[in-house]
């Protein structure tokens, strides 16, 4: 077995040393009696120069051919990473067919790149985003685990809507109507009576018919729930988890941020506390910016864009009117027309990344709210049971992981924040 050097490690190898690298052909330039190949592996790219007989063999390789190449390390400021390899052998190769994505297609045709996403994931941009995504998932797990949360799992087949019936995916479950989960929340609310602080990161499903830059039909959802907690605790955990994710990306992924052209100064200022903006204040700010909105209206993506451009950090937008939030949100006893709810909106126009708040813990209050929202209490039997036995103040949120990746990477569309996006028109590859 051959001692292979990861491409990302070459810059620390002394000049003149013989190495073997392996990877896939990323770029090819054929000159009269030389061939320059740029080879990539998961750790980086390197330019390799082939002369003489080897140039002929190298010229027959395609983009994305797989190779093992032996050669000598040379310092070359003009080459990527300041290093070049003078090849002396091609130890193994898989030539493969003509790769269907070339450089200009990559810029021009976004539908082609979605149709060929199973191949486009090899691109430098997607590779960089996926590395940052991996860091963000790891940071969110690390934040919850280091703050006393237990990781739990909730079912994907469910029997009742959490976030409104209009975005449910229905399915026939052995003759019984069932749905794909919109949120693990209700299960987390059951689990806090065992573990007190719980979280899960899992897919949620929403039959979103609107094609927007931030909606998927299947998205990765980090949800947490805490017993003995209220609105302020949700805000504290929300800003803590977002700040930890940004901090870890700045520690581990500076190279990837530079590959995708994301300026770090936008991220360096993301530290707690985040500004708190009440719904009332938000309506005022928006009105002063010329947005026609009356109290009681929902604050949608366009209004969020205007609002977030006033701040350079995420904001806690709290105390939404009862009617614009789901039935389970607890009304503020001081202002019963509002709820103890909070959305965290990412800056630079990205908007909502977290939705959450305090839940109704009183049985009768919840039954009357379910009825007030035109829902059937008998569909929420087990959820109501939680209010019959040892019910306590409790609160939680859902964080859209794909939207968090989208904002941290500065992407134009949430579909570029995950490897295989799903929206109403796409379920392949
Ligand atoms: N445990 C909880 O309290 C979560 C609560 N039941 C819930 O689902 N809230 S949410 O609908 O605002 O969704 C939460 C977040 O989930 C993200 N989200 C919500 N819907 C989507 C879609 N369709 N695509 C991508 N991301 C989505 C977005 O960041 C939201 O802020
Ligand atoms: Mg929401």
Image: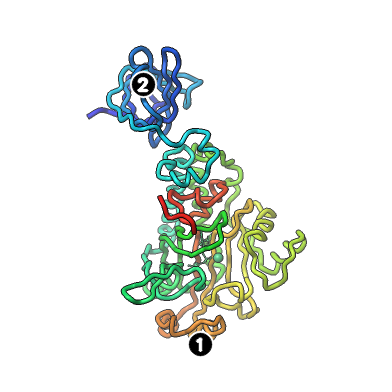
Residue occupying the point 46% across, 42% down: 126
Q: Name the residue nearer the viewer: 236 or 383.
A: 383
Query: In which quarter of the view is residue 351 placed?
Result: bottom right
Where residue 293 appears, x then y in whole percent? 72, 67
Q: Which mark is residue 58?
A: 2
Residue occupying the point 32% across, 17% down: 88
- Is residue 229 something one can see in this rendering? no
Q: Name the residue nearer the viewer: 335 or 273.
A: 335
Please say if 238 is above or below 192.
above
Q: Name the residue nearer the viewer: 84 or 48.
A: 48
Q: Secondary structure at mark 2?
A: helix
- Is residue 233 something one can see in this rendering? yes
* Colour mapping: rainbow
User: If you read the primary sequence from the N terminus, does the residue marked by circle 2 or circle 1 appear first?
Assistant: 2
Is residue 265 found left or right of 414 in the rendered image? right
Where residue 389 appears, x then y in whole percent? 40, 84
Dot 2 and dot 1 residues touching (CB under 8 Å): no
Quarter in which the N terminus is drawn: top left
Q: Which residue is label 1 attached to?
A: 364
Residue occupying the point 53% across, 73% down: 358
Query: In which quarter of the view is residue 142 placed?
Result: bottom left
Residue occupying the point 45% across, 65% down: 224
């Amino acid at each position: 077995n051959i001692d292979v050097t990861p491409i990302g490690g070459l810059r620390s190898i002394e000049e003149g040393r013989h190495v073997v690298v392996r990877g896939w052909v990323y770029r090819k330039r054929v000159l009269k009696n030389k061939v320059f190949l740029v080879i990539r592996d998961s750790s980086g790219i390197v330019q390799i120069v082939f002369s003489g007989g080897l140039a002929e063999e190298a010229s027959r390789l395609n983009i994305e051919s797989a190779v093992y190449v032996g050669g000598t390390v040379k310092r070359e400021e003009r080459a990527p990473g300041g290093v070049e390899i003078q090849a002396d052998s091609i130890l193994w190769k898989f030539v493969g067919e003509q790769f269907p994505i070339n450089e200009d297609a990559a810029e021009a045709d976004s539908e082609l790149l979605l149709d060929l996403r199973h191949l486009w994931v090899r691109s430098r941009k997607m590779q960089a985003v996926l590395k940052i995504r991996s860091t963000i998932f790891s940071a969110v797990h690390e934040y919850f685990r280091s703050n006393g949360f237990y990781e739990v799992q909730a079912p994907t087949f469910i029997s009742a809507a959490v976030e409104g019936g209009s975005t449910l995916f229905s399915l026939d479950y052995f003759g019984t109507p069932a749905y794909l989960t919109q949120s693990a929340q209700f299960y987390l609310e059951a689990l806090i009576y065992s573990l007190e602080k719980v979280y899960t990161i899992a897919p949620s499903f929403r039959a979103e018919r609107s094609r927007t830059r931030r909606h998927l039909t299947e998205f990765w959802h980090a949800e947490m729930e805490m017993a003995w907690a209220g609105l302020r605790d949700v805000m504290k955990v929300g800003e803590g988890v977002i700040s930890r994710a940004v901090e870890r990306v700045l520690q581990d992924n500076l190279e990837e941020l530079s590959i995708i052209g994301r300026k770090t100064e936008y991220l360096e200022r993301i530290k707690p506390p985040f500004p708190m903006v009440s719904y009332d204040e938000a309506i005022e700010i928006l009105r002063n910016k010329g947005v026609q909105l009356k109290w009681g209206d929902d604050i949608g993506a366009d209004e969020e864009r205007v609002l977030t451009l006033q701040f350079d950090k995420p904001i806690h937008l709290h105390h939404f009117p009862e009617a614009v939030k789901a039935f389970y949100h607890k009304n503020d006893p001081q202002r019963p027309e509002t709820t103890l709810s909070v959305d965290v909106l990412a800056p630079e126009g990205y908007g909502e990344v977290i939705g959450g708040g305090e839940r109704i813990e009183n049985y009768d209050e919840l039954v009357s709210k379910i009825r007030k929202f035109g829902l059937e209490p008998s569909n929420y039997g087990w959820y109501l049971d939680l209010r019959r036995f040892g019910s306590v103040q409790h609160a939680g949120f859902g964080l859209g992981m794909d939207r968090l990746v989208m904002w941290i990477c500065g992407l134009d569309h949430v579909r570029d924040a995950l490897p295989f996006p799903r929206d109403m028109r796409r379920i392949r590859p």
